[in-house]
Amino acid sequence: MLLCWPYLSNCSLWVSQPCGCFFSTSNQRNSQFYSDPTEAVKDIPSGATILVGGFGLCGIPENLINSLLKTGIKSLTAVSNNAGVDNFGLGLLLQTKQIKRMISSYVGENAEFERQYLSGELEVELTPQGTLAERIRAGGAGVPAFFTATGYGTLIQEGGSPIKYNKDGTIAIASEKREVREFNGRHYIMEKAITGDFALVKAWKADKAGNIVFRKTARNFNQPMCKAAKVTIVEVEEVVDVGTFAEEDIHIPSIYVNRIVKGGSYEKRIEFKDIILHLYFIPLSVALSVCLSISFMAFFCLFIFQKRTVQKAQAEKPKPKKEADIVRERIIRRAALEFEDGMYGILENFTERCILIERLGNMYSLAQYPNHIDLCAGKETVTVLPGASYFSSDESFAMIRGGHVNLTMLGAMQVSKTGDLANWMIPGKMVKGMGGAMDLVASAGTKVVVTMEHSAKGGKHKILETCNLPLTGKQCVDRIITEKAVFDVDKNKGLTLIEVWEGLTPEDIKECTGAPFQVSINTCPQPQIVTLQTPLWPRPKSCQRTPETKL
């Protein structure tokens, strides 16, 4: 291949006038085309490091994974955001014990993944999702390491996070401590780039020159992984003639692609199918890069869903509301009031569940009732409205790290009085992975709001003086919203009670809270979105903020 770089900044001049150019050539690397995916992967040896694209089940290289299953190779190190589900995607290779180590951000709905990890059968290097994407991007760009604020003050920085357990539950292999440096008054940790021996990638189309394009959100981790392996193998749904793609529309040029396989068939499972009853949205013109995250997911538009089902399970009939459902509704009705700056939304009838959508994962904009189905990064079905855009996972977290997101909302297991957050694992018992949560709370200038039930099962405190679970972020929470109260959090002053659920008093809140707090002089009843005439903003005058006083 030949690369010409003009000295002159005015590109229109260098054609008509003589100018100096740099010339650079690469080794001849024409993409090879295969009809059999097994042939394309047959030289992958046991012990290889493979980068596997996709997010959940969206954009995974189904045929290449199934072919690896047939080869029977062992001791693989698999780099992938997650590992599919129990009986599909990388979950198949876990079942046959062909994977020795997973480098991932999220365990998710794969019960076998979690079981093998906790029983000591599988090594798992859990990495924040944005850090994982950037480590892969850096590897493809020849950058050996970089510094990020994500993970500072957590096990990621301190070391000691379990990579492999012994059978008795003790830690056999622990993560290494990260180097810390300070830049402009903030602490950052060093992360090393990731490269692989092979990348298994799913794309939509390839032309006969080896250029490829992705379809919508399926570019996710596929795009950066194309560039970070010695050998990149891409499976596509269609091979087209050269010239079919406009040059500016090509997502990955052929210089990164070694092998292309036309997939024979695709199941394209959908993990979660949502049925919407009501939709209330924020105009795109005033969205202002707001990012909401509940239980590790970030969204742009408010939906109320009747049900949420894993595809393999049969649809269930709507069930009567439980007390837990009522509690969650109360929390979300209050959380909706966090929208500001001209945003508005109406909430009327709630049924079983309400979820905020659309995630800063692989698309940006608003989403609505899923009639033309796309997948958001929450692995759920949505329809994207005009004006939306799609991008890769590394681009997604660049938006977050770069301070372009104003608001993050997420769940928690514990929050400390100074704003420490814990929400991703209970050592030795439960691990879902941090997903993108560590990245979301590490961005400077982003308001972090925690939505959670006030107490855990058995009445155990979740708001504590000090968290005793592994941290997601240190001194990162700005506000806590529960079904009983709302607290503002200051990393120096601590907690201030600003709202109380009707019928409760500050003394009631004190009894169920495991940390001391101050009380606003004009503490008000916790407001809720109730009727079609209730705007999200401005806040009712009866609930304006005033200085606090000690309880």
Image (cartoon, grey):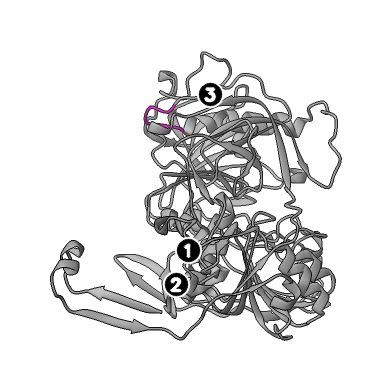
**Residue type pointed to by label 2:** Ile
Residue holding disc 1: 150
**Magenta span of residues:** 339-343
Q: CA distance from mark 3 to mark 1?
A: 33 Å
Residue holding disc 2: 189
Q: How many marks?
A: 3
Please name whichever residue, 40 or 279, is drawn nearer the observer in this view of the structure.
40
Residue holding disc 3: 527
**Residue type pointed to by label 3:** Pro
Please name whichever residue, 296 or 97, is drawn nearer the observer in this view of the structure.
97
Q: CA distance from mark 2 to mark 3?
A: 40 Å
| Left or right: 438 in relation to 13 | right
Please name whichever residue, 168 or 506, is drawn nearer the observer in this view of the structure.
168
Please name whichever residue, 204 or 92, is drawn nearer the observer in this view of the structure.
204
Going 73% across and 71% down the picture, which residue do you hit?
A: 37
| Left or right: 261 in relation to 69 | left
Q: Nearer the viewer, mark 3 or mark 1?
A: 1
Q: Which mark is residue 313?
A: none
Q: Residue furthest top?
A: 533
Res 39 → quadrant: bottom right
Q: Residues within 10 Å of mark 2 (few under 14, many from 20)?
A: many
Secondary structure type for disc 1: loop
